[in-house]
Each structure stands twice: as C-alpha cells, then as structure tokens.
Image (cartoon, rainbow, N blue to C red):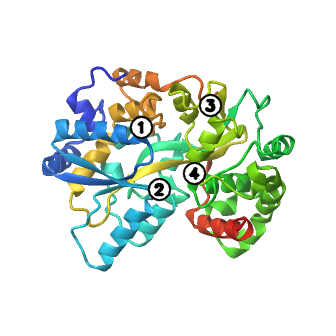
Amino acid sequence: MIHSLSRRQLILGGLGLPLAARAQAAWSRIEQAARGQTVYFNAWAGSERVNAYLQWAAGELKRLQGIQLEHVKVTDTAEAVRRVRAEKAAGRSDGSVDMVWINGENFLAMKREALLFGPFAESLPSFAFVDTAGKPTTRLDFSEPVDGFEAPWGMAQFTFMADRARVSKLPDGMSELLAWAQANPGRFTYPRPPQFIGTTFLKQVLVEQGGDRQPLGKPMTREAFDALTPALWTYLDALHPHLWRQGKQFPATPAAARQMLADGEIAIALSFNPNEAANLIATKALPASVQAYQHGSGTIGNTHFLAIPFNARAKEGAQVAINFLMSPAAQARKADVAVWGDPTVLAIDKLPAGLRGAFDAARVAGAVQRAAPTVPEPHGSWVEPLEREWTRRYGVS
C-alpha cells in the first residue's frame, strides 16, 4: 500500500510546503532531543491487530528517529490516569507514563486535574493535514475542547453489524430496531454498561429518542438529566424483554457479542468502527453475509487521541512518536482493513498528490455502504450518571 514515501515524508507527515523557519528550527530541536529516548506508551491491548500495528510503528520510529517505543499494555485507560494522578499527589516529576491513548471521560479528568503536558498537538508538523473542518471532533472530545492537549489519532462512529441472511431489512433508527427486536426476540443485545459500546448504545438511544440534543453538549445538570432521560428508560423498558435472554443478562464485552453474531446466536451486533465488519469478514471471523450500517439520521461519532502526561520523562520522544502516528504513511497503514481498519483523521485532499494514493487500499467495499452524519458525543459528564442509573434499573438480575 505504501511504496516510496521518503524518510522525511514519514517523519514530518509528508509536508508538501516547507515549515516556517522558526517552527522548523523548533521541531528540529525536539527531534534531536528525542533521539535515544524510550517512550512508554500506555495503550489498550485488547486487539491483536492493534498490537501488531504498534509493533510496526515501534520499528519505524527506531529506524527513522532512534526512539524506542514501548507498548505498555492496559485493559482500561483509567489505569494510566490513576497512575499519573498518584504520581502528581506524590510530587513525582519523573513519571512512568510518557504517552497515552485516550479520549472521553479520561481526557476530561486529566485536563481538569492538570495532568497533561501541552498544548502541543497543533504544533506538530503532521497536524497540518488533519481534517478539522470535515471532522470537527478532532478538536472536541466528548464536547470538551481539546485545546491542543491531545492529538487526533483515529476516527470512530457507532455502527451496527447485521447478518443479512437473517435480517431482510436493516432497521434505520431506534424505533425500527425496537420493532425488529419485537418481531425477532432474542436476536439482539448490547454489551453491559459501563462497557464503552454498551454505554454508547444508551447514548445513541438518548440522542434519537430524547428530544432536544442541545443540553447533551453541555456539562450535565440534574434538571437536564431528568428532562431528557425518561425517553431512554421508556425505550429500554420496551426493548429489554425482546433481547437475548430477555434482557436479564448482557454480554460482558463487544468481542463476546461479535462471537454470538458469528455463531448465529444473535443477528445484529454493535461496533464503534465502520470498518470492523469488513475486517472480520476478511479474516473469516464473521460470515460474508454480515453488513455494517448506520442509522440514516446519524450516529454518535468521535475521535480518539494521543496525549502526554505533565510529568512524562520523554516529552520530546512522545511528540515525535505522535507526529509519526499522525503522518500519512502511518495513517494509511492504520486505515487499511487488512492491517487495522481504523479511519484516518487526515483530509486526503490536503495531501500532496503523490501521497493520496497511499489511502486507496483503505477504501474497502463491504463496510458501511452509506455513511451517516456524525452526531457529536454528549459531554463526558453525562456518562457516569447514565451508567449509574442504568445499573440501578437493569444491572441486578
């Protein structure tokens, strides 16, 4: 897919125009200081494909920049947040986390508690190609302004995966999904909140059924919560008796639900990656009859980011690593369904003509055929109250 990108293109993101002299000099100093540093990158490790991609990136950074990227595998980003928080409380300036894959509640907590280094993101050379106009969530994280304290790495959008051998007409909206579930009892479920996909399902119901969306983009208030959420609970009360195991049990993870889809136990599953179904079909983990789709009125989407803690020991190395991960070469490889299938944050039309072809392999048929509008995430402060109330109502069998 990527044939002849030069070393300079790889490192600087393939910039077609020279950086301003002062910015170039500053970036060169960062690159020089980064050489020889070890960057401890705390990142979710729940996917073999993601892990393999990070191994590739580590090899490229070692070869191109003399940086050692160490993937510190975590199951929940909150682990890294707690570690940085504890180090700040202990007065540690030599932190154990140099870089973290983050968004949503975890970013909100780190930003508010002054646990982040920056702003740095928009000073990175590769940021020149980020699609900030077409993908506004590259500057907003769960409706919280990023303000340069994290760098956009990949795009995500809530997506349904249906086995067309058993779903003749794709439900186009939550009302149609309810009707389908009532006609096909036991063939749909969602992961148990607070698992991320499960919570996102709650938010998707809320934005479709709850009426006025404007309060969702602001910090949660009890008044707004009490006004908007009754429609969510009414919907779930109607849906749950028709779910797998009558809504008395829920899959613990999206992977468990995907396996149920593969085994024919359910007919519709959920994802936050529009390319996931195509990826899994390519590896024969899902049957070829599975089709990814999104509700025509829009589904929740966001950007996932890379950040640097305030007390990172290898701040320069982390910036160079993040710049590389945002570069056209790294973004094109990541977007390739055969590698990962994570949608790019870049605007392809901003790239020099010679670099656009690197993304051709990312356009794989069989994923979402009709991309829906992106609905911004509710503000991160809505998440915990939604999860807490869901658990109170439905979490005890």
Q: Is residue 160 visible?
A: no
Residue 222 coordinates in the image, percent (x, y): 69, 75
Q: Secondary structure at mark 2?
A: loop
Q: Is residue 251 visible?
A: yes
Query: Which comes sooner in the sequence, label 2 or label 3?
Result: 2
What amino acid type is highlighted by mark number 2?
Asn
**Relative to residue 374, is residue 349 depicted above or below?**
above
Query: What's the distance in space between the residues labelled 1 and 2, CA to CA?
Result: 20 Å
Residue 128 vs residue 204: left or right? left
Q: Quadrant of residue 184?
A: top right
Q: How many marks?
A: 4
Q: Which mark is residue 139?
A: none
- Tell me, yes or no, whether the two marked residues, 1 and 3, touch with CB atoms within 8 Å: no
**Tag 4's secondary structure?**
loop
Q: Which amino acid is tagged 1? A: Arg
Asked if disc 1 and disc 2 are in contact, CB closer than 8 Å, the reply is no
Q: Position of residue 15 (x, y in %)?
A: 30, 33
Determine the CA span between mark 4 and mark 1: 17 Å
**Residue found at x 62% / y 31%:** 368
For badge 4, the amino acid type reads Thr
Specify few, some or many for label 1: CA neighbours under 10 Å numbering under 14, 14-19, or 20 or more: some
The picture places residue 159, in percent across and down from the top left corner, at: 63, 40
Q: Can you tell which of label 1 and label 2 is closer to the viewer?
A: 1
- Which mark is on residue 103? 2
Residue picked out by circle 1: 49
* Residue placed under numbered mark 3 in the picture: 368
The CA span between labels 2 and 3 is 24 Å
Residue 178 or residue 379, whichever sits in front: 178
Q: Nearer the viewer, mark 2 or mark 4?
A: 4
Q: Which residue is mark 4?
A: 253
- First in sequence: mark 4 vs mark 1: 1
